[in-house]
Amino acid sequence: MFRVTAGHFYIEDPTMSDIKAELYIHPKLKCFRARIGAIANTGHTITEDSGRFTIKSIITKDALLCYQATRQDAETDIGNEWAVLRGRHKVQTSRDFEDTYLDAPHVEQRIAINALRNHLADIALRDVLKPGDRIRATKAECCASEASFRFKDWSGGWIISTGGSSIAPGSVYSINGNVFRV
């Protein structure tokens, strides 16, 4: 799934085969969300009226993905749009990602792009990281800057450092000095 070349990690084929979306009611927010596999929030704005779903596109700002669709049709449309978004994904470092992240036209697309990046990085890093590895990443807190950490373990979808910091997989820049691209 990944390779190391000249001190750089690359994801060769980070496909999300058979993309299927599932609509669910968020337990705390009490509103509909869409999930695809391990990605708990695709970024879609979803409204429901009498079993019919209206969903805002994450690719085209202010456009509707579907209007008054059945649950099955809505899930299919979300899966198809997610496949298009996945097809547009560019392999890049976390620093490059931070530079281009705000170029997305709206917040829903930023949520989706960030979720996709974290998902792909999670898949790659679970095979790579070993306890004690040095990672350069951005800690998961507001206004955090990039720093060096030692990998300890995973907690859900988060990397945990020996110092107890939580790190999103998509924010990892390097592992033991090797630049990581996803």
Image: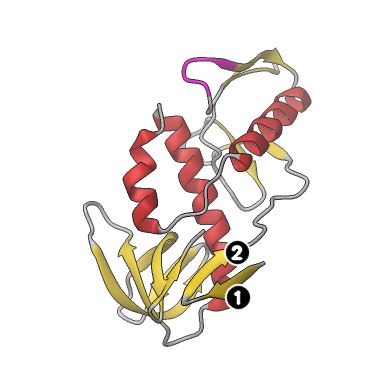
Magenta span: helix, strand or loop, mainly? loop
Q: Are marks 1 and 2 in contact (CB under 8 Å)?
A: yes
Report crowding for label 1: few under 14, some 14 to 19, many 20 or more residues within 10 A (C-alpha). few
In the image, residue 12 lies at what x, y percent? 64, 62
Q: Nearer the viewer, residue 12 or 107?
A: 12
Residue 171: which quarter of the image?
bottom left
Q: Residue furthest front?
A: 6
Mark 2, residue position: 123
The image quadrant where one finds the N terminus is bottom right
Residue at the (47%, 86%) spot, across then down: 131
Q: Is residue 49 left or right of residue 95?
A: right
Closest to the observer, 134 or 152: 134
Looking at the rendered structure, the kind of residue marked 2 is Ile
In the figure, 89 relative to 33: above or below? below
In magenta, the rendered stretch is 60-64
Q: Which mark is residue 127?
A: 1
Residue 77 at least partly seen: yes
